Image (cartoon, rainbow, N blue to C red):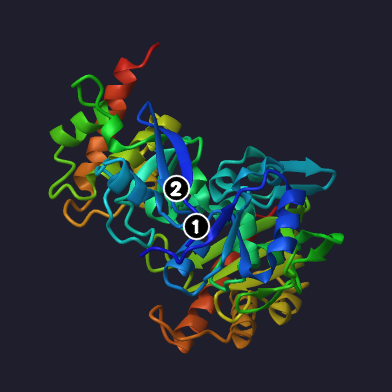
Amino acid sequence: MIPLAFDYHAPRSVSEAISLLSSLGEDSKLLAGGHSLLPMMKLRFAQPSHLIDLGKITELRGISQVGNEIRIGATTTEHELLHSKLLAEKVPLLVEGAGLIADPQVRYKGTIGGDISHGDPGNDHPALMLALDASFVLQGAKGERVVKADGYFLGMYSTLLEPGEILTQIRVPIPAAGSGSAYQKLKRKTGDFATAATAVMLQMKGNTVAKVSIALTNVGPTPLKARAAEEALIGKQINDASLNEAARLAMSICEPMPDQRGDADYKRAMCGEMTRRALQTAHARASKA
Amino acid sequence: MAKTQTVSFKLNGKNVEAAVEPRELLIHTLRERLLHTGPHIGCETSHCGACTVDVDGMSVKSCTVLSVQCNGADMLTVEGLEQGGVLHAIQQAFHEEHGLQCGFCTPGMMTRVYRLLKENPNPTEQDIRYGIAGNLCRCTGYQNIVKAVQSAAKKLAATAPA
């Protein structure tokens, strides 16, 4: 399986990449880790005439803290997220999520920016980004704009990213001290997409929920923010009754596509279970002060 | 047709060059142009790991990397493990522990283990199983592969400079 012929470009800077995008037009595609795009090109689901490889642009890579924010370059790999001491300390949810993505070889190549801007509802970072209330920096010929993760995902393979724009950076507010987080992902085997998965960020005040964010992977055309489930938990204790209600509300917004991972009812049920488990785990990790 | 490009990289310590179309996958350049047939073509869909090679300190599936992406890279395939007629500790350990049966997955498996042990010279069984999760073996049931990796880790530790 070999992709159709294309021309290859390897810019050294973001500005060079943006001018290539403008001059080559809509028949060009950005190449990051290539582990979604190249398989699609082999299958002829994507047939770009030009590939613009972001892999040689060093400014697009790396993880740093700026004030109360973690900034991650778009071509930072899953392997780098998984082994980042800064993330382990400040945003452990991202480390947990990266460790559940694909397999070691794919994690060396796959990038956080590619995972986000591909717009595949099976990808894991979109829900993680919703749970973390992240923002994305989009750069184009007309300059830079910063958009929220919430609202970025429009549909299957469709995001706010305009033709001519590059997602250059991911900005994650550092969760408050004492927050608990978890990503629970059901998959059939290593390397598979989630049958269902749930990301949770949780802040307790004493015994009750002060703040909670719940996002769902692969149970709709985009990642879903389970707002009703969040609202129902505020001020409640985490117990069987509140967990069941949150799971029920999360399941009620699912529109899973039946496929070889299961039918819609099964996937919806698994979303409920992942939601329950993610809340329990985040609760166990959160400080109860 | 897109223009061919010359890519050059270091392969098992030697500088090599190949003229390739941009769409050529690394596995084909290695096997068909550079005649390094150690890396195997299994699934061609980046699932099985039989095509694993080491590129700039990363285990990668060469069926899902373009050769043009590897210009200037430093690459190791299974052919580069043995040195001067002496098997690498990983190869010796796979031999002694029966870490292979049909052998199809073995070049990719050993190349992956090479990087795993560089990053984590003293892995737990769980580290090993997680670390080789991108390499499928349909013969061994993995048990003897895990033993081989444990044995290789001991061999490498014994020969490592103090």
Q: Chain of mark 2?
A: B
Q: Secondary structure at mark 1?
A: loop
Residue type for callout 2: Ser
Residue B67 bears which disc, if any?
2
Name the residue nearer the viewer: B159 or A8: A8
**How many residues crowd around disc 2 within 10 Å: few (fewer than 14), some, or many (20 or more)?**
many
Name the residue nearer the viewer: A9 or A182: A9
Percent coordinates x, y for residue A195 in the rendering: 46, 74
Kindly identify the residue that appears in the image at 24 percent across and 44 percent down: B37
Q: Secondary structure at mark 2?
A: helix
Residue A100 bears which disc, if any?
1
Vertical order, A74 against A246 (above or below): above
Percent coordinates x, y for residue A99 in the rendering: 51, 52
Kindly identify the residue that appears in the image at 58 percent across and 75 percent down: A240
Percent coordinates x, y for residue B82 in the rendering: 24, 27
Vertical order, A155 against A32 (above or below): below
State the image quarter where residue A151 is shown. Answer: bottom right
Vertical order, A171 against A62 (above or below): below
Residue type for callout 1: Leu
Judged left or right of residue A33, residue B108 is: left
State the image quarter where residue A62 is shown. Answer: top right
Percent coordinates x, y for residue A218 in the rendering: 55, 75
In the picture, the quarter occupied by the C terminus of chain B is: top left
